[in-house]
Structures are given as C-alpha cells and as structure tokens.
Image (cartoon, rainbow, N blue to C red):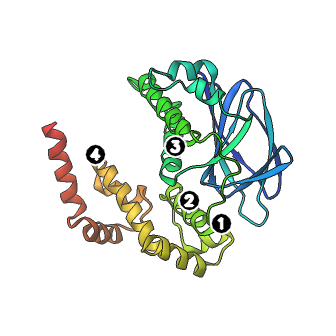
C-alpha cells in the first residue's frame, strides 16, 4: 500500500523460484536481509547478497531468482516516487537528479556493511511507523525517509562501478547469522535451529562465528537479549516482565546474566533509570 509517496515490501524467493519485480512509477531499491539472489541484465547475470543494493528505475522490471544451494533469500524493498525524492532534496543534494543520472535502468552496488545495516534498520523503522499514529509521526517519518535517501545516494555515488564484487562467503554467513539472531532474539535460538535455517553444520557455524566476532554464538545471543532487557527496563517496563519478553527461559538465569554483564542487578538498574527519568 502506498504511504505518502513511498512503498515498503518484503520478497521471499523459495529455492530457485523466479520472481518478476517491477518498479512501477517509482525508483525501487532492494536489499537482502538474508541469503543471496541473481538478476540478469544485458546478457549478464549478477549475484547480490547482503552487501549489495539493487536499484530499478521507474517503469522497468527484472526477474529475480534464488541462488542455488543457499537458504531462501529474504529481501527488503523500498520505492520512492519522483515527487517524494524532489520533496526530500535540498541545497546539498538533489536525490531525483542523482538517481536519474545513474547510467542504467538496473544497477547493483556493493556497499559498506555499516551503511547496509543502518539502511535496513531505517527501513524497518519506517515500516513500523506506518502502523502508529503518535504525535509528530509524519515529521519523524519524513526524517527517516530523508536518511534512507541519503544512505542510498551514498551507496550509488560510484556510478561507473560495474558488476558488484562478490563478498567473501564467510562474511555473508556471519552477517546473515547476526541479522537472523537479531530478528528472532525474543525466541529460543539453539544451534540446531541455526543449522536447519542455514543448512550448515553447527560446528561450522560455531567456528566461523567465533573467528568473526571473538565470542560464541550462545554468548552473542545472551548479550543481545540482555541489551534488549536493558532497553525495556529503561522504558519503564517492570523487571518481572522483562526477562520473559526478551526470551529468557527463567528469571534466575536472566538475573545472573544481567548482573555479570552490567555489574548490577536488574532492580538496581531499574532504580537508576527511574531516577534519571524523574530528573528529566
């Protein structure tokens, strides 16, 4: 559904299934949340993964297909109308002119991991804003759209870049694992589940995750859950509700882990947050 000149949607390719994707009257940008996929243009086939952004100019279409032998890619799509791009533009940046000047109707670029992750988070936040009607929501949404446009423009600043350089598969696996964990952090995520989801042995997952992050998968999951708990507490949620909402199996496990991580109990942290909020 269109919302103020933009569209956000998700695409999932099952196996080697081919999916036709059109831009309509929009500039469409597609980012992979997990997995990788192919598109074909000018008799050449390009592979895109979680490090790539695909742009499709208005009134154009492409066929996407999942990469053989990998888990089904989950794709995130955002579309901007020409009118909205003009509205988002300012003295420093004309988004409409920037994207229109790109040399091809279809183009994919490899972007820095930080830029990719920030852009995905902003788009997800935008999607959530569509379902709320809080005070100042339209202003906040316009700000998010401006930031997304800025990061996309930065990704496509190298207009002469040809086929994207395929990132190391180890990097792709690590980023996909971390993204999957973040998306499902309120659930139980045993190694068996990751093994099934990614079709990779748990031993290989453990080894590559340790190499890439310096910590075990279990440790990363616990730390991510605790960070979520700390956010819930800071927002005023009772400690007795926090641990279950973040996916901890029991309070005692949560209590010990929280105290070890933050050097204070959940109750002490709650009191600090209450005092800080009161002083505001």
Q: Is residue 50 above or below residue 144?
A: below
Viewer-nearest residue: 259 or 150: 150
- Sequence-first disc among 3 and 2: 3
Q: Secondary structure at mark 2?
A: helix
Q: CA distance from mark 1 to mark 3?
A: 24 Å
Query: x, y (%) of residue 242?
Result: 35, 55
Which one is in front in this view, the residue at disc 1 or the one at disc 3?
3
Q: Is residue 111 above or below residue 203?
A: above
Residue 3 seen from this side:
no
State which quarter of the image contains the N terminus: top right
Q: Quadrant of residue 195?
A: bottom right
Q: Is residue 188 above or below residue 139?
A: below
Q: CA distance from mark 2 to mark 4?
A: 27 Å
Would you call the spot at circle 3 few (<14 residues within 10 Å), some (14-19), or many (20 or more)? many
Residue that label 1 marks: 197
Q: CA distance from mark 3 to mark 2?
A: 16 Å
Per the rendering, the mark at residue 166 is none
Q: CA distance from mark 2 to mark 1?
A: 9 Å
Query: x, y (%) of residue 21?
Result: 77, 38
Q: Secondary structure at mark 3?
A: helix
Q: Is residue 90 above or below residue 61?
A: above
Residue that label 2 marks: 180
Per the rendering, the mark at residue 119 is 3
Residue that label 4 marks: 236
Q: CB under 8 Å between callouts 2 and 1?
A: yes
State which quarter of the image contains the C terminus: top left
Which one is in front in this view, the residue at disc 2 or the one at disc 4?
2
Query: x, y (%) of residue 120?
Result: 54, 45
């Amino acid at each position: 559904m269109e919302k103020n000149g933009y569209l956000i949607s998700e695409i999932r390719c099952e196996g080697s299934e081919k999916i036709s994707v059109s831009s309509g009257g929009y500039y469409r940008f597609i980012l992979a949340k997990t997995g990788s996929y192919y598109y074909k243009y000018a008799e050449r086939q390009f592979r895109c993964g979680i490090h790539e952004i695909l742009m499709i100019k208005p009134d154009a279409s492409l066929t996407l297909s999942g990469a053989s032998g990998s888990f089904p890619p989950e794709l995130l799509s955002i579309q901007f109308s020409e009118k909205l791009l003009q509205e988002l533009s300012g003295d420093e940046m004309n988004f409409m002119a920037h994207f229109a000047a790109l040399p091809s109707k279809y183009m994919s670029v490899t972007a820095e991991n930080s830029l990719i992750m920030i852009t995905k988070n902003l788009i997800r936040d935008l999607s959530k804003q569509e379902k709320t009607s809080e005070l100042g929501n339209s202003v906040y949404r316009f700000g998010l759209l401006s930031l997304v446009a800025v990061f996309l423009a930065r990704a496509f600043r190298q207009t002469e870049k040809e086929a994207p350089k395929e990132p190391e598969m180890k990097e792709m696996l690590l980023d996909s694992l971390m993204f999957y964990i973040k998306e499902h952090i309120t659930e139980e995520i045993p190694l068996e589940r990751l093994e099934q989801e990614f079709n990779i042995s748990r031993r290989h997952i453990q080894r590559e995750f340790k190499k890439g992050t310096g910590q075990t998968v279990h440790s990363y999951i616990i730390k991510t859950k605790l960070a979520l708990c700390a956010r819930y507490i800071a927002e005023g949620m009772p400690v007795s509700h926090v641990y279950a909402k973040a996916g901890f199996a029991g309070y005692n496990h949560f209590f010990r882990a929280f105290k070890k991580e933050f050097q204070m109990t959940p109750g002490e942290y709650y009191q600090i947050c209450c005092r800080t909020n009161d002083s505001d």
